[in-house]
Amino acid sequence: MKRKIIKLGQATYVTSLPSKWIREYNLEKGDYLEMQQKDDSLIISTNKISPRTEVFVDLFDYNERTIRNVLNQTYRKGFDVIRLKISKTDQLDIVRELVRDTMLGFEIVREDENFCVVENIAEPSPEKYDVLLRKLFLTIKTEAEEILGEIQQNKKFNLKRRKDNKNFVDNYTNFIRRLVLKNKIKGSRDSYLLYYLISQLSLIHHAYYYMCAYLEKQKNNNLDLKVIELLEQANKLFCLFYDSFYKGDLNLAHDIQVKKKELVNEYLYPLLAENTGVNAVALYHIGEVIRTTQMASTVLFGFVDEEVK
């Protein structure tokens, strides 16, 4: 948007502020704003707390999967109070579990027979975004390395650790997506790109987790050497993604596009054609890691005018 500069007196210049932004943050005459000069930009911000938002949702006869979708999407949209109409007794148990595991900062503050209220009572500050995102990346990197080590050494999977990490990743990818939408991180123009990237990180981790969960249940879960080598290459691809994101290096992002095509066409497809059983299932999940990592990395080309820290 454009705003005209008006001169008042000898050395005072003023301009108008967008009315939508004023209303969103409940600003009034006499309030103070923070201003920061960055290159040729002037960043205007406010520390004033925006009004709390509420929403009412009827859960009808929804099952666990649909309730999860409803709560996740409502939470990510930035609502502070979610009022839920309960139709079946087991729905409240599902809501309790989802709030605990996937809605960081929220608690159930009221329960009735056919109604409950979920409210934001201890949400971390948006300033924690950078720390949380890096922690998320590093958790997935470590998880990938540990899983590869367990497979290479034919060790029993540490499923408790895998499950704990899955809960962490699900919780924090959900919360960071909420931050992105609610606080327009990266700006309104590019926040959707960041939201997509975080969603892909969740899917990458799910591919690792569900591969382990499947292999652990099999009597013979030894993988062929070529399958293990492809998993190692998938891990390296994710590390390349991490480096390209935090270095803001589009050459590395380009390398991911090239490497993905090579891994899929020259290794994944031939191995899928000649394998069955546990190897085929493992290859499916490895392929998901490769494909989703490449898809997440495409976002970096949309940040060409951004400074990636």
Image: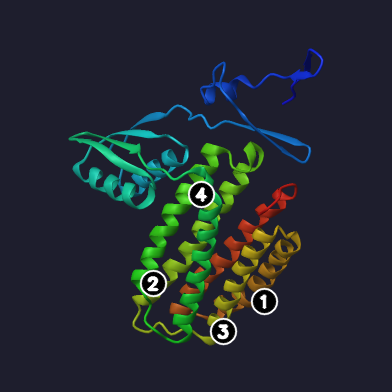
Mark 2 lies on a secondary structure that is helix
One can see residue 280 in this view: no
Q: Amino acid at mark 3?
A: Lys
Q: Amino acid at mark 4?
A: Lys
- Position of 117 with respect to 130 (left or right) is left
Where, quadrant-wise, is the C terminus in this rendering?
A: bottom right
Tag on residue 226? Answer: 3
User: Is the residue under label 3 in contact with that under label 1 (CB below 8 Å)?
Assistant: no
Q: CA distance from mark 1 to mark 4?
A: 41 Å
Q: CA distance from mark 2 to mark 1?
A: 25 Å
The residue that mark 2 highlights is 214
The residue that mark 4 highlights is 128
Mark 3 lies on a secondary structure that is helix
Mark 1 lies on a secondary structure that is helix
Q: Earlier in the sequence, mark 2 or mark 4?
A: 4
Q: Is residue 11 above or below residue 167?
A: above
Q: Position of residue 55 (x, y in %)?
A: 38, 30
Where, quadrant-wise, is the N terminus in this rendering?
A: top right
**Viewer-proximal residue among 46 and 106:** 46
For discs 2 and 1, the disc positioned in front in the rendered view: 2
For discs 1 and 3, the disc positioned in front in the rendered view: 3
What residue is drawn where x is 53% and y is 68%? 141
What residue is drawn where x is 26% and y is 37%? 109
Q: Earlier in the sequence, mark 2 or mark 1?
A: 2
